[in-house]
Image (cartoon, rainbow, N blue to C red):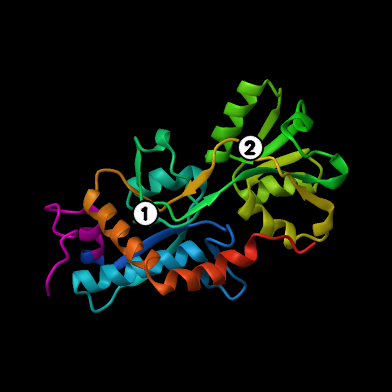
Amino acid sequence: MCVPHYLAAAPTSVTLEHIKASHIINIGYRQLEPFSFRDNSGEVSGYTISLCNKVADEIKHSLGLKKLDIHYIPTLFTERVSALNSSKIDFDCSVNTDAPERQKSVSFSIDYYTANMRIVSLRQNNIQTLNDLKGHTVSVPRGSKDLLELNRVNREKHLSLSIITSDTVADAFDMVAQKRTAAVVLDDILAYPFINQSEKPEAFTVSHEIVGEKMKYAIMMRKEDPLFVAFVDKTLEHIFDSPLNTQLTNKWLTQKVVLKN
């Protein structure tokens, strides 16, 4: 078999060698619809999972493996880097925002989605803008880019926010639903499934105002493994240039950018 040029660009790849030796690929994920989640039937799926499954198929073919088992590993925001460095996971296929401050410790693929961070609150709180949010308590997942951006905006705009962090996005959202915080600052596409699945979707509101910088989603990988990064990027480029990308977008993303009520 002729090895692709991007596979031969470096003498070794820690990730590819590990996969070749074990015939197993470990994929990190979180419960974040519509990108990665375990559904009621127990199947892990979503837009990013679909991309990573295609990467796994390409790895299997390029390494000439007859068998490649995929293990999906639940991984918190705060555990991603240590899970990669300890080889608990080979790459993280949930929501990861490419940020300059993170590139010192991990690598990112090319972007596959861009989201906007917005204010999500109960309609009765009458919060639509950052000025409305001033002096209130806000929930946000720890270890997330949302937290980094919110801290920056809080300082620059002197909002005097009281920020409460949580282990998961679901926990941060629940704090608002339970009236423990006035709002949650969250990427819009991640907020919509939580609102739509709540008991009273009509009770929530999402701000028109965008908070902070745009969130560019990418697959997170181990640092110092340029061969694997190049392999993933090449596979993603092929997907984005093919009809498969439209199919995946229509299946997972298009229906998720609106609220039911």
Amino acid marked by disc 1: Lys
According to the image, label 1 marks what residue? 88
Question: What number is the disc on residue 45?
Answer: none
- Most distant residue in the bottom direction: 66
Residue drawn at x 52%, y 39% is: 145
**Main SS category, magenta section:** loop
Question: Quick one: label 1, few (<14), some, or many (20+) residues within 10 Å?
Answer: some
Can the viewer see residue 89 in this picture? no
Amino acid marked by disc 2: Val
Question: What number is the disc on residue 211?
Answer: 2
Residue drawn at x 35%, y 42% is: 106
**What residue range appears in magenta?**
1-19
Residue drawn at x 63%, y 37% is: 211
Residue 143 located left or right of residue 70: right
Residue 223 located left or right of residue 17: right
Residue 31 located left or right of residue 238: right
Q: Whole-percent x and y of residue 76?
A: 51, 49
Image-quadrant location for residue 194: bottom right
Q: Whole-percent x and y of residue 37?
A: 55, 63
